[in-house]
Image: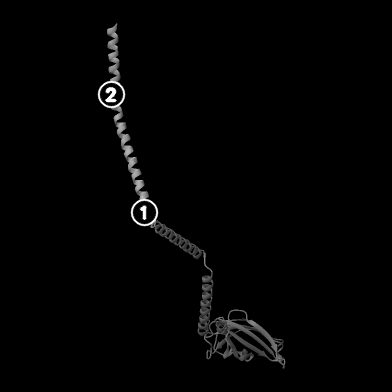
């Protein structure tokens, strides 16, 4: 994993910033293909490198000591201010002005604006055009492809790492599943215990089958007796009205006979 990370870092650094290469160019009078009078100030070749899918071009203007200190200034280049401006004097006292600009296309002309000020000799502002040679120019697409591949490798590596960390930490859903699984296991174990108890009860009932049969026969006879008593009671209850009616008739007869006897005695 460490080696892979180091390799990805090397590829990324190579895709982001490539080594500088020499690039020839011409300094032209603005808007033409004629060599500019200020061409002698510009040192050839320029250097170019690829950074963040863009060309970073560094140029140098050299003026003699007798023309004063840094008599030429770059006001703008490729539509913006110059970048990474450095002023360096060599041992002879000559002025060396370094500046850079960024672009995605060096096949078209680059325009710049210069301010020239040689005390008591010349002072003016001039536009100038640069025409760069594309021979040996590094490709932005190749570097972009390398960077894209490295980015994809880094993304896949981070995705695998996230997936591994996610799998090592169960979420709430997995916890619920685990709980449900535990409940299922408990229910299955309970069922097994119940089945064990049932088998034990069956096995224990086999030696006393005779006694259980006797108990069942006694219970059956008890039920039959209870049913017989119920039938007798129902029959008695059904005969009771007839008995009462007979008693009432007898009482009426006796009362009627006694009344007849009493009248005769009078």
Q: Could you tell me which residue is drawn at 34 percent across and 45 percent down?
A: 221
Which label's residue is closer to the chain start, 2 or 1? Answer: 1
Identify the residue at horizontal 30%, vertical 21% (top origin): 248
Question: Disc 2 or disc 1, which is closer to the eye?
Answer: 1
Residue 224, horizontal then vertical, whole percent: 32, 43
* Cα–Cα span, label 2 and label 1: 54 Å
Tell me if mark 1 has few (under 14), some (14-19) or many (20+) residues whose alpha carbon lies within 10 angstroms of its own.
few
Q: Which residue is mark 2?
A: 246
The dot on residue 78 is: none
| Most distant residue in the bottom direction | 92
Residue, disc 1:
210
Query: Residue 81: horizontal and vertical position, in percent?
Result: 62, 79
- Residue 231 in the image: state x and y as whole percent: 31, 37
> Of 209 and 177, which appears nearest the observer?
209
In depth, the one of 219 and 65 nearer the eye is: 219
Foreground of the two, 189 or 221: 221
Q: How is the image coloured?
A: one colour
Farthest top residue in view? 266
Q: In the displayed structure, would residue 197 be above or below residue 24?
A: above
Quadrant where the N terminus sits is bottom right
In this picture, is 141 found above or below 205?
below
The image quadrant that residue 127 belongs to is: bottom right
SS for callout 1: helix
């Amino acid at each position: 994993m460490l080696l892979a990370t180091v390799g990805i870092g090397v590829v990324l650094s190579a895709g982001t910033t490539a080594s500088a290469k020499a690039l020839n160019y011409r300094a032209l009078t603005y808007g033409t293909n004629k060599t500019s009078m200020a061409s002698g100030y510009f040192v050839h070749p320029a250097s170019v490198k690829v950074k963040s899918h863009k060309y970073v071009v560094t140029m140098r203007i050299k003026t003699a000591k007798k023309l004063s200190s840094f008599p030429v200034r770059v006001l703008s280049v490729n539509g913006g201010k110059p970048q990474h401006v450095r002023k360096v004097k060599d041992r002879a006292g000559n002025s060396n002005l370094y500046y850079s600009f960024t672009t995605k296309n060096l096949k078209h002309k680059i325009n710049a604006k210069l301010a020239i000020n040689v005390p008591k000799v010349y002072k003016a502002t001039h536009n100038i055009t640069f025409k760069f040679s594309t021979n040996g120019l590094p490709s932005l697409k190749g570097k972009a492809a390398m960077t894209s591949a490295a980015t994809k490798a880094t993304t896949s590596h981070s995705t695998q790492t996230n997936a591994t960390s996610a799998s090592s930490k169960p979420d709430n859903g997995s916890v619920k599943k685990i709980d449900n699984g535990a409940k299922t296991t408990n229910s299955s174990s309970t069922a097994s215990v119940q089945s064990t108890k049932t088998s034990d009860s069956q096995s224990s009932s086999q030696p006393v089958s005779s006694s259980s049969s006797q108990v069942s026969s006694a219970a059956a006879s008890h039920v039959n007796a209870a049913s017989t008593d119920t039938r007798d009671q129902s029959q008695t209850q059904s005969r009771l009205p007839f008995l009462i009616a007979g008693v009432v008739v007898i009482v009426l007869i006796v009362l009627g006979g006694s009344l007849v006897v009493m009248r005769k005695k009078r």
